[in-house]
Amino acid sequence: MAQIPAESQLVAGQVAPVPDQSKAIAGHAFLSLLALRASFGCTLVAWHADGLGVDVQFHVRERLDGQAPVSDFSLDFQLRATSRGLPVVDHKLLFTLEVDRYETLRSVVAERPRFIVLLNLPPDFNGGDALAAEDCIAQRRGRWLCLSGAPQAPNTSSTPVRVPTWNVLTPAALREIARRVSLGGRFFHEQ
């Protein structure tokens, strides 16, 4: 299985993240709680070296639909956290993503789709805040997007990504994404 590129060699079971990774830590807590509430497992794959994200795999070990041919599979998610005020254009959050991450997420070669989660933290988030994963879920701060089939990035450093404001990542939404994947459903990118 191709992995979502990680900017760091740090993986689960090694050294704990450094204090400047507070956004990544908040993101990991958010995804872990989502998985717990969706009755899925969650494994940390990597911390991003810039302190702004994590890569995780959600493990599904149940039949989510009577028609589903698979009941034991994983989903690859990459979370990027920001506390910058993001512009909203046509009900989509405009976020700049590094091209190497974008290219991996948009790959249609993978046996299953990969997803990006944008965790939009409060503008005054400074890492010392007691913003809990519970608060992030209750305040609907996570948005998801599948970039499968998206066009190639126009340049070599970063590219804008438009994350629909209506794609709120909740435990129910995570279960629905997993159900669609278990049925072989495709996710197509729209800009």
Image: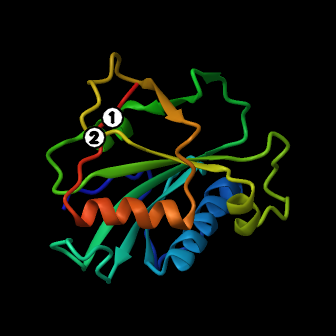
Disc 1/disc 2 C-alpha distance (Å): 6 Å
The residue depicted at 55 percent of the width and 52 percent of the height is 53
Q: Nearer the viewer, residue 1 or 191?
A: 191
Q: 67 left or right of 115?
A: left
Q: Nearer the viewer, residue 92 or 52?
A: 92
Query: Considering the numbered disc 2 on the image, is that residue within a helix, a strand or a loop?
Result: loop
Residue identifier under label 1? 189
Label pair 1/2, CB-CB below 8 angstroms: yes
The residue depicted at 30 percent of the width and 59 percent of the height is 180
Q: Is residue 27 above or below residue 41?
A: above
Visible residue check, residue 46: no
Q: Which image quadrant: the N terminus?
A: bottom left
The residue depicted at 71 percent of the width and 59 percent of the height is 136
Q: 135 left or right of 185?
A: right
In terms of sequence position, does the residue under pointer 1 or pointer 2 come before the other?
2
The residue depicted at 28 percent of the width and 57 percent of the height is 3
- The three-letter amino acid code for the residue at tag 1 is His
Percent x, y of residue 109: 14, 46
Residue identifier under label 2? 148
